[in-house]
Image (cartoon, helix red, strand yellow):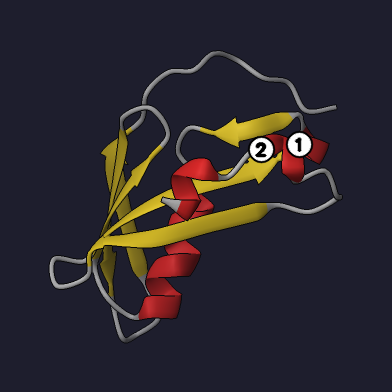
Amino acid sequence: EELAAADPDDYTDETEHYLWAWIDKAAGTIRSRMFAPHLGIREDEATGAAAVRITDYLSRDLTIVQGQGSIIETTWSAEGWVRVAGRAVDDGQRQID
């Protein structure tokens, strides 16, 4: 509930904010949101780099639900590798200057 209520406009500093919560811990499914307004990204639809970091942090395979229907599947390896695959919803083009 707190994750759904997060307002991207509350994150105005010069850093990225990755928020997440368990949907089903036993199944390894999380819901996440990513805000990076200083890069012109109010809310990212699917964040592969953040998916790698949270997978490594939790040391387990994950299914990540993000944005308006994006699904990121990650596979964790104890040798330091994370594989990423999935489906991202097209939410338009952006340009970073």
Q: What residue is disc 1 on? A: 37
The disc at residue 97 is: none
Q: Is residue 21 among the parts visible in the rendering?
A: yes
- Marks 2 and 1: in contact by CB < 8 Å? yes
Where is 93 relative to 51, above or below?
above
For image coordinates 39% across by 61% down, the residue present is 21
Q: What residue is disc 2 on? A: 8
Looking at the rendering, which quadrant does residue 35 occupy? top right
Q: Is residue 48 among the parts visible in the rendering?
A: no
Looking at the rendering, which quadrant does residue 87 occupy? top left
Return the residue nearer the eye: 62 or 80.
62
Q: In the displayed image of the protein, which residue is found farthest to the bottom?
A: 78
Task: From the viewer's perspective, tell me whether residue 24 is left or right of residue 11.
Answer: left
For image coordinates 14% across by 73% down, the residue present is 26
Mark 1 to mark 2: distance in Å? 8 Å
Where is 21 relative to 73, above or below?
below
Return the residue nearer the eye: 68 or 50.
68
Residue type pointed to by label 1: Pro
Tally the marks.
2
Residue 40 in the image, given as x and y percentages of width and height: 76, 29
Dot placed on the residue nearer the N-terminal end, 1 or 2: 2
